[in-house]
Amino acid sequence: MTIHHIISKLYRESYLLFRPSLWGKRLQINGIPVIGNRSRLTLGHDVSINSKCYIQCVGGVKIGSCVTISYGCTILSSDLQSQDYPNICMVKNREHILQPVEIGDGVWLGAGSKVMPGVKIAPRIIVGAGAVVTKDLGKEGWLYAGVPAKPIKPL
């Protein structure tokens, strides 16, 4: 084991050590994810979160058990009010819209995929690398891919 691997493991372990809300979850962290507003995050067991992931929990994020969140994934749970967009210069402080995200058991989010606010993903779904999930994915046991994510084939 190289010194780089040892230092990386120490970073991961210290990340968990100073976040009591993540204790006892059988959580596997590879690299250092960014989790905003952890108090609004609900985690199942056996969740794997890889490096360069960003999980914005301000609107609430619920992640089921046996979920894999691959390298570079983004999960967002809030958006900006866009109703007055043409008058953007007149609107100094646009409102944030909080929309919770739910990810079912056994979901695998491929590398670089993005989950937008208010989305629910059914159990046992694979979201392909680079896909953007803009609407609910309700077909349990399917592969979704593309921008926006669409059903490709059953697993």
Image (tube, helix red, strand yellow):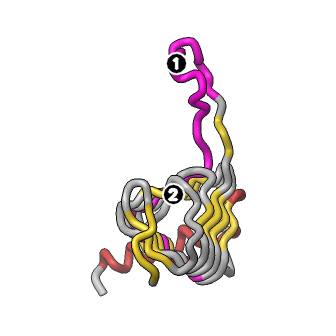
Q: Secondary structure at mark 2?
A: strand
Q: Which residues are magenta?
A: 66-94
Residue 68 in the magenta stretch? The answer is yes
Q: Is residue 10 visible?
A: no
Q: Main secondary structure of the magenta part?
A: loop
x, y (%) of residue 127?
Answer: 44, 69
From the viewer's perspective, is residue 28 above or below residue 128?
A: below
Of callouts 1 and 2, which one flags the residue occurring earlier in the amino acid sequence?
1
x, y (%) of residue 124?
Answer: 55, 80
Residue 49's disc number: none
Q: Quadrant of residue 46?
A: bottom right
Q: Secondary structure at mark 1?
A: loop
Q: Amino acid at mark 2?
A: Val
User: Please, which residue is most extreme toward the left here?
Assistant: 2
From the viewer's perspective, is residue 139 above or below residue 106?
A: above
User: Please, which residue is most extreme toward the top here?
Assistant: 90
Residue at x-position 62% and y-position 62%: 120
| Residue 15 falls left or right of residue 148 | right
Q: Is residue 76 visible?
A: yes
From the viewer's perspective, is residue 94 above or below residue 72?
A: above
Q: Amino acid at mark 1?
A: Ile
Quadrant (top left, top right, bottom left, bottom right) of the C terminus: bottom left
Mark 1 — residue? 88
Residue situated in front as seen by the camera: 48 or 96: 96
x, y (%) of residue 84?
Answer: 58, 22
